[in-house]
Amino acid sequence: MNIHSADATTAEEALSIQEKFDSETATAVAMQDTLLTPRFYTTNFDELDAINVEHIRDEWDPLIAQMVSDPNKGHFKKNADWDQVDWDGMDPALRKEFIDFLISSCTAEFSGCVLYKEMKRRGSNHEITQLFQLMARDEARHAGFINDALREAGVAVNLGFLTQKKKYTYFRPKFIYYATYLSEKIGYARYITIFRHLEKHPEHRFHPIFKWFQEWCNDEFSHGEAFALLMKTDPKLTRGHNVWWIKFFLTAVYATMYVRDHQRPAFHQALGVDTDWYAHEVFTKTSELSKQIFPITLDIDHPKWVPTLRKLQAANVDLANAEKSGAKFAALGARLRAAKAFATLFFIPAKRHNVPSQTRLEPCY
Ligand SMILES: [Fe+2]
Ligand SMILES: [Fe+2]
């Protein structure tokens, strides 16, 4: 019997270890479903199960072999590198934002785990179920590790409760591909940017979990590679009117990250990271990576890009305040401003480019 989720070889094993712990507040936060909080997804599993990887086998097999070799087995566990965390001595604003960050990250990791595990359970196509089992394994470890960190602060997310009670949003498979591919790649870009920054500025590493980010983001990188290959099995997914959907998901994922990160000023200040710089770094890396499969990237250097993101962020702050005080008219106004800002971002002309015939990439940042 394994004693830690880091040593688990399947998602089920990792989760049964985590289910022993819970905390009401953290779980309540993780249960929230807003535009900005991580959601749980469900999809048409039969359509996914019907994917044929035969004509991408030269790229598929090495990726699966690498995931099967499991380079991160045993990695997601506290060891001698895990320094003592002074939760009580932490600035209260930082503590609040950091716990919020951990809960949101844990929910996002777990959301991937639940979706991948379900695909593995429902499918009969060996290629597909094997891939999803491997990804579910990784996400269960990631979620378990964040829960370990949270537990030290006296909170933990009840993963079993979430599985049963959190609302599931239905997405068609193609939307799952776009959204999940991007969230894996942006996850890689976010974690590696923080990791590289803290390598140069270790004095800002206020919590040991950041030391684990390099191997962690390599898992996310592989998951993104898998979704790029899944999309490659059907060229229609990245052509014609679907390019508009790709643009929609790029805009939504980037804008959500910008707004959410700007809600955590104390957290980014403690890391010594300027949130605007960080956003631009992460967008640049994600755009560069997504050229492997998407025929467009967003023009993040367009003169309207940053000012409109700021408007979206301001509208979002006003909306939260209006909702808190029950000011319905003000809330409606803020919502319209947010919608207008999103539409402006969406209609900034995208940059087109040719997609390479070889899709696979290695982590390079
Ligand atoms: Fe993950
Ligand atoms: Fe992932």
Image (cartoon, helix red, strand yellow):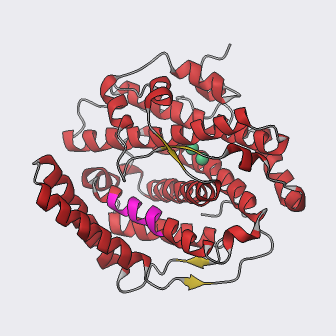
Q: Quadrant of residue 345?
A: bottom left
Q: Is residue 356 visible?
A: yes
Residue farthest along the top direction in this orientation = 1
Q: Is residue 309 visible?
A: no
State which quarter of the image contains the N terminus.
top right
Residue 170: x %, y % from top left? 53, 47
Q: Residue at x 33, y 38 (%)?
A: 99
Residue at 44% x, 43% y: name it: 105
Q: Quadrant of ligand 1?
A: top right
Examine the rendered structure and indicate whether residue 299 appears above or below residue 1: below
Magenta-drawn stretch, dominant element (helix, strand or loop): helix
Answer above or below: position of 11 versus 184. Answer: above
* x, y percent for residue 286: 55, 66
Q: Give the total of numbered labels.
A: 0
Q: Position of residue 123 (x, y in %)?
A: 76, 38
Task: Give the residues in magenta.
Answer: 251-259
Left or right: residue 32 versus residue 167 is left
In which image quadrant can residue 88 be found? top left
Is 255 included in the stretch rendered in magenta? yes
Residue plotted at (71% across, 77% down): 355
Instruction: Give whichever of 25, 144 is nearer the camera.
Output: 25
Left or right of 43? Residue 128 is: right
Q: Which quadrant is the C terminus positioned in?
A: bottom right
Q: Is residue 73 left or right of residue 50?
A: left
> Which of the pair 111/66 is nearer the observer?
111
Q: Is residue 95 above or below residue 326?
A: above
Q: Is residue 80 left or right of residue 99?
A: right
